[in-house]
Amino acid sequence: MYLQLNQLSVRYPGLARSAVSDVTFGLKAGDIGVLIGPSGCGKTTLLRAVAGLEPVSNGSVQLAGEEVSSAGFSKPPEQRRIGMVFQDYALFPHMDIGRNVAFGIMHMKDAERRERVREVLALVGLEGERRRMPHELSGGQQQRVALARALAPKPQLLLLDEPFSNLDVDLRERLAHEVRGILKAAGATALMVTHDQLEAFATGDVIGVMHEGQLHQWADAYTLYHRPATRFVADFIGHGVFAKAQVELHEEHGGLHKHVVTPVGELHDISPEVLESLPEGEVEVLLRADDIIHDDASPVQAKIIRKAFRGNEFLYTLQLKTGEQVMAHVPSHHDHKLGEWIGIRAEVDHVVTFGVS
């Protein structure tokens, strides 16, 4: 792995628990990793430890095959060849865009420096803006300038700390896609911190979910969503609820077969391998909003108690006759009133269960 963290811990004096505890993951060269989690989960502290801005209390950080941090040792940040992009851009207001981008490559000869500035500004789509001042640019353009400045010295690793948090919500996901394209075109290896799932999904090749200083899972977005490793990941990623269910043994066709019965009916089309792995008895099954289908012909009825308009769909919160709640994505032309009863059924491709809490 190009970036490798091994049982990394960061502890601040006077605190009962470590800000980061026993974190291990690897990032391949050219890949983009994203750390996501609630405020205070340790993701920014972890990023700062990789940069050399926080001392490591245990474990190690290796970059391009070299150990750069361990307990009692830290290679200085300026010697790590790491670029950083911050949420406030940190552009110099008295310098034009060209000089901002050139700031970290003043050691180059004039012609080489001018060519490198031209290259990275072209990479971020701002080749014709080098004489403009930062205040003349939009927030999204300023963020791309900050990215160009960080890429100009050809860093071994690029770190991005909440790079889109100061931008309008509508701009964030679009710029996340753009930044991913820029990083891939540059062949950069990057590690980003965000609290926004859409940004993480739009940007990352691999995503780490953190909570209370611990890394719960390090995987691609599809795996996090459909095969969460812990209850926290299952709850944090996407919209869904945990519903009590029964895994029952029924005698059929001369043998015993497992059935999964939930408040919204029996789950069908479960692969034999997954069925075999499920423990018999009561479990909690994760029912995401896209697992619940609006079906007027279904015998299972639920009352709409909340709804949120999302443009192309509604997110309904539904209450069953048993009192349990589920959520469902419903096309926006199915505009039912609060308090109305509708038919629903479960269509679960990936069954995720946990022990009853």
Image (spheres, rainbow, N blue to C red):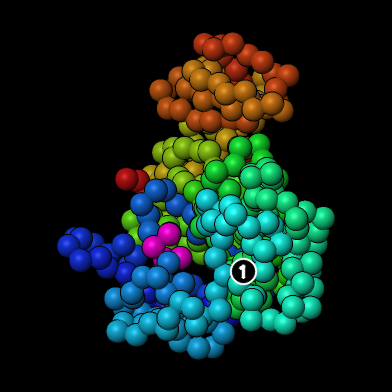
Name the residue located 34 percent from the left edge and 85 percent from the top edge.
Answer: 73
Q: Would you call the spot at circle 1 few (<14 residues within 10 Å), some (14-19), or many (20 or more)?
A: some
Circle 1 sits in a helix, a strand or a loop, which is it?
helix
Q: Quadrant of residue 58?
A: bottom left
Q: Does residue 41 show up?
A: yes
Name the residue located 82 percent from the left edge and 55 percent from the top edge.
Answer: 128
- Quadrant (top left/top right/bottom left/bottom right) for the N terminus: bottom right
Q: Does residue 180 show up?
A: no
Name the residue located 71 percent from the left edge and 62 percent from the top edge.
Answer: 98
- Say above or below: 357 vs 110: above
The three-letter code of the residue at mark 1 reads: Phe
Q: Which residues are magenta?
A: 43-47
According to the picture, the residue beneath numbered tag 1 turns out to be 103
In depth, the one of 69 and 108 nearer the eye is: 108
Q: Main secondary structure of the magenta part?
A: helix
Place of residue 284 in the rendered image (x, y in percent of width and height, measured from the top left)? 42, 44
- Say above or below: 335 vs 331: above
In depth, the one of 129 and 61 nearer the eye is: 129
Most distant residue in the front direction: 94
Place of residue 234 in the rendered image (x, y in percent of width and height, measured from the top left)? 48, 49
